[in-house]
Image (tube, rainbow, N blue to C red):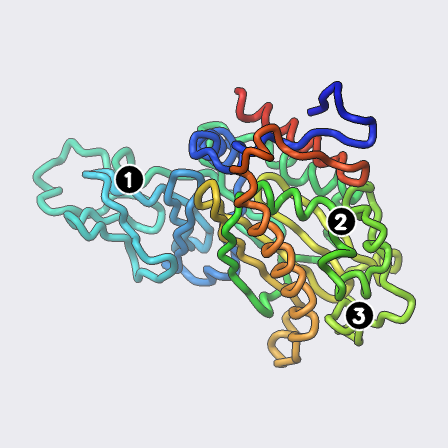
């Protein structure tokens, strides 16, 4: 998104209204969040049949549930009778079925309509056809990803392909065995900023020397302003005297069993569009999921993942959690400081990106193309 009157060192950002206009946000819901693969829930959060979580995907409320056959399934959280939401709680458990609190239409964990008042007097009702509307679901990296599209895009291309573009191959992320790791800490952030500001922030490190003193102590190359995730296969190397990815650079935990020698003492960051950030370090993984709520509000759920042995033994994870928790708070504060300016007359035509941020322009091009179709 360049303009002819800018010097070669600068390219334009998106205009300010892209971050404030409810019409733009509605388009993003319809053409991005409701058509792509959206990372919904950690699979292990729903360990037994009947456990469910409700998540917002674009304009739709989606139920993800562990069914009786042990599989995860997803459905629109809408009763087929009169449209009431079946579940109003964000998480919970049902014994055998979901029952709408309005008229008691009841659905099993596979979505089939199994009971309703006077249902036996209506033998012409197809209980599968009038069951819950299914949503496409794939499990990968220990998470359930859903797609509302009638024909979802290629998971291999859109999700797995992004990992390949960043790391050079899928084998590199397989070494971290994310599906076998356990959540050691989860922090949910309520960020008063547009989701794109958070994505753009994560994609660049021009700000790192300014607002991330702890991070640049551990990863000195970040002080130079270039984002490590911009380069295929590159992992930012720990500082010479740094022992682990912790808030004070002290020793962390044993290297994850599958992590290769050339991945040791390195940090890899990956953006999976539209709403996922993956951060890989030798002894744990930090996994962000964003849930855009409105043009100026985004819920971010961040998981710190460790081996089962680390979590079950009760080892203290606070020093590694504290490092990226501070990074998150610093980043989100910066985004919240930026959000009000998006409606300023000074930002009507947007701002500019310096050379170390030029790759964000590709994200802007991708976004505008999605919104135009």
> Residue 138: x and y, percent?
54, 43
Between 150 and 4, which is closer to the camera in this rendering? 4
Q: How far is mark 1 from mark 3, CA to CA?
A: 51 Å
Q: Would residue 256 be visible to someone looking at this image?
A: no
Q: Residue furthest right?
A: 240
Between 236 and 194, which is closer to the camera in this rendering? 194
**Which of the 4 image quadrants contains residue 9?**
top right
Mark number for residue 131? Answer: 1
Q: Residue at x 70, y 64 (%)?
A: 284
Q: Which residue is mark 3?
A: 244
Q: Residue at x 49, y 37 (%)?
A: 20
Q: Which residue is mark 2?
A: 205
Dot 3 lies on which element? loop
Q: Would residue 270 be visible to someone looking at this image?
A: yes
**Which of the 4 image quadrants contains residue 177?**
bottom right
Query: How crowded is the residue under tag 3: few (<14 C-alpha within 10 Å), some, or many (20+)?
Result: many
Q: How far is mark 1 from mark 2, CA to CA?
A: 48 Å
Nearer the N terminus, badge 1 or badge 3?
1
> Residue 366: x and y, percent?
63, 28
> Residue 110: x and y, percent?
36, 47
Dot 1 lies on which element? loop
Nearer the N terminus, badge 1 or badge 2?
1
């Amino acid at each position: 998104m360049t303009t002819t009157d800018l010097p070669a060192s600068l390219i334009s950002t998106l205009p300010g209204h892209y971050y404030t206009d409810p019409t733009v946000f509605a388009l993003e819901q319809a053409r991005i969040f409701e058509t792509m693969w959206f990372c919904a829930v950690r699979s292990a959060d729903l360990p037994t049949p009947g456990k469910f979580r409700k998540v917002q995907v674009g304009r739709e409320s989606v139920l993800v549930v562990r069914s009786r056959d042990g599989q995860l399934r997803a459905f629109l959280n809408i009763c087929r009778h009169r449209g009431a939401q079946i579940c109003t709680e964000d998480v919970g458990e049902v014994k055998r079925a979901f029952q709408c609190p309005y008229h008691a239409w009841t659905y099993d964990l596979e979505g089939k309509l199994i009971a309703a008042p006077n249902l036996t007097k209506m033998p012409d009702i197809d209980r599968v056809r009038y069951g819950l509307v299914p949503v496409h679901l794939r499990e990968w990296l220990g998470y359930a990803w859903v797609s509302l599209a009638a024909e979802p895009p290629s998971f291999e291309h859109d999700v797995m392909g992004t990992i390949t573009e960043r790391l050079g191959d899928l084998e590199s992320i397989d070494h971290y065995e994310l599906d076998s790791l356990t959540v050691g800490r989860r922090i949910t952030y309520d960020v008063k900023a547009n989701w794109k500001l958070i994505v753009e922030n994560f994609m660049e490190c021009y700000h790192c020397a300014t607002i991330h003193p702890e991070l640049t102590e551990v990863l000195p190359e970040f002080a130079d302003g270039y984002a490590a995730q911009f380069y295929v296969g590159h992992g930012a190397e720990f500082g010479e005297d740094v022992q682990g990815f912790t808030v004070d650079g002290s020793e962390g935990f044993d290297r994850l069993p599958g992590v290769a020698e050339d991945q040791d003492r390195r940090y890899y960051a990956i953006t999976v569009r539209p709403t996922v950030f993956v951060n890989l370090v030798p002894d744990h993984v930090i996994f962000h999921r964003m849930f855009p709520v409105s043009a100026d509000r985004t819920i971010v759920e961040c998981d710190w993942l460790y081996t089962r042995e680390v979590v079950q033994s009760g080892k203290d994870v606070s020093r590694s959690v504290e490092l990226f928790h501070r990074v998150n708070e610093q980043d989100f504060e910066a985004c919240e400081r930026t959000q009000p300016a998006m409606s300023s007359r000074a930002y009507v035509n947007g701002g500019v990106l310096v050379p170390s941020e030029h790759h964000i322009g590709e994200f802007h091009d991708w976004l505008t193309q999605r919104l135009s179709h």
